[in-house]
Amino acid sequence: MQTPEKSNDPLHGLTLEKIVTHLYESYGWEELGQHIKINCFTSNPSVQSSLKFLRKTPWARKKVEDFYKYSLRKNKLK
């Protein structure tokens, strides 16, 4: 019987909501909007409105996921 391999993908098992919530709690909307220049973080931001936009917009979702991975690496080096 084989044991399942552990995924090296830091996004494995995470929902988009968990990612956005983590980034918001870590950076706040203003700083997040400076790092990821998309309107859902700069113009009347909320977790729910951001999720609605990101679920429909693959390029923006990729930016958020890439920034999340970057922030994990950055914090690991501290």
Image (cartoon, rainbow, N blue to C red):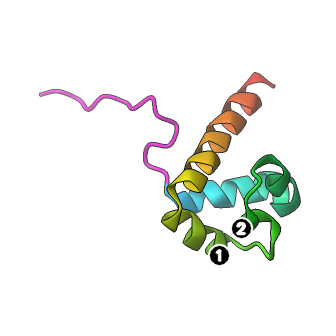
- Looking at the rendered structure, the kind of residue marked 2 is Cys
Q: Position of residue 64 (x, y in %)?
A: 63, 50
Q: Quadrant of the C terminus?
A: top right
Q: Which residue is located at x 82 percent, y 62 percent?
A: 29
Where 73 sits versus 45, above or below?
Answer: above
- Looking at the rendered structure, the kind of residue marked 1 is Ser
Q: Is residue 28 left or right of residue 62?
A: right
Q: Secondary structure at mark 1?
A: helix
Does the magenta segment cover residue 62? no
Q: Secondary structure at mark 2?
A: helix
Which residue is most to the top? 77
Q: Position of residue 20 (x, y in %)?
A: 64, 59
Viewer-side residue, 3 vs 22: 22
Q: Position of residue 30 (x, y in %)?
A: 87, 60
Q: Which residues are magenta?
A: 1-14
Where 27 sits versus 12, above or below?
Answer: below
State which tag comes first along the sequence, 2 or 1: 2
For label 1, the residue is 49
Which residue is most to the left? 1
Where 6 sits versus 14, above or below?
Answer: above
Q: Is residue 30 left or right of residue 51?
A: right
Helix, strand or loop for the magenta stretch, by majority:
loop
Q: Mark 2: few, some, or many residues within 10 Å (few <14, many ≥20)?
A: many
Q: Tell whether label 1 touches label 2 (CB within 8 Å).
A: yes
Q: Which mark is residue 40?
A: 2
